[in-house]
Image: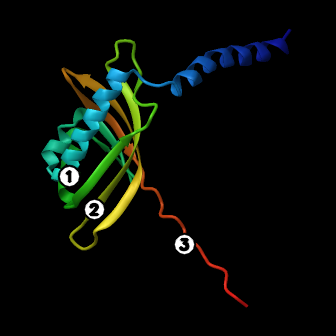
Amino acid sequence: MKIHLPFALVGLAISFAVPILAQQTSPPDSQLREQFVAYLKKFDDVWNSNDQAAWAALFTDDAIEVTHTEPIYGRAALQKLWADLKLNFSNHVTTLDQYSPHVIDTAGNEVWMNAKYSLTVKGQNFGPIEQKGNLCSILVRDGDTWKMRMFTWNISPKPAPTTTPTSQ
């Protein structure tokens, strides 16, 4: 009797997981996708403007950005961080993943999305540097707009240099 219980639990877990896995690769609602394509255009425009206040306005008050070094909590802290870094961004382009966004709640007011990005960054003592990577975000509807509650990103490593065979 006890041997059958683990098999029953595994079967139950699989029966719940299969619909979730199918949902993750199904195309999103076309109207919602259009909203996010427009949102990411605005996101790119704000990054390219280098306006930290406008950038912070894309986030909720309780937002978190998970960076490559540590998480930053709250819209005010995010705005201060980006102002203190004194970086200049240009050529920011974000491409929404074909399966994004994904609705989280039943009312359709929370979603997560992932995308690829590329940009040029220049600091006071370096650059310009071309960067590419991936980002993922949880967004909530705020009236007629979307705001990021959680934002995380990475920097894709540059491909390793290829070696050519030497003649002997």
Residue in view at x 19 percent, y 42 percent: 56
CA–CA distance in space, label 1 to label 3? 30 Å
Which residue is outermost to the top?
1
CA–CA distance in space, label 1 to label 2? 10 Å
Q: Nearer the viewer, residue 41 or 13?
A: 41
Query: x and y percent of residue 87 in the render?
Result: 22, 61
Q: Nearer the viewer, residue 39 or 16?
A: 39
- Amino acid residing under circle 3: Pro
Residue picked out by circle 2: 121
Query: x and y percent of residue 121 in the render?
Result: 28, 62
Residue picked out by circle 3: 161
- Amino acid residing under circle 1: Asn
10 Å neighbourhood of mark 3: few (<14), some, or many (≥20)?
few
Residue picked out by circle 1: 48
Left or right: 30 with respect to 10? Answer: left
First in sequence: mark 3 vs mark 2: 2
- Amino acid residing under circle 2: Val
Whether 60 is drawn above or below 162: the answer is above
Q: Helix, strand or loop at disc 2?
A: strand
Left or right: 101 with respect to 82? Answer: right
Q: Nearer the viewer, residue 130 or 63?
A: 130
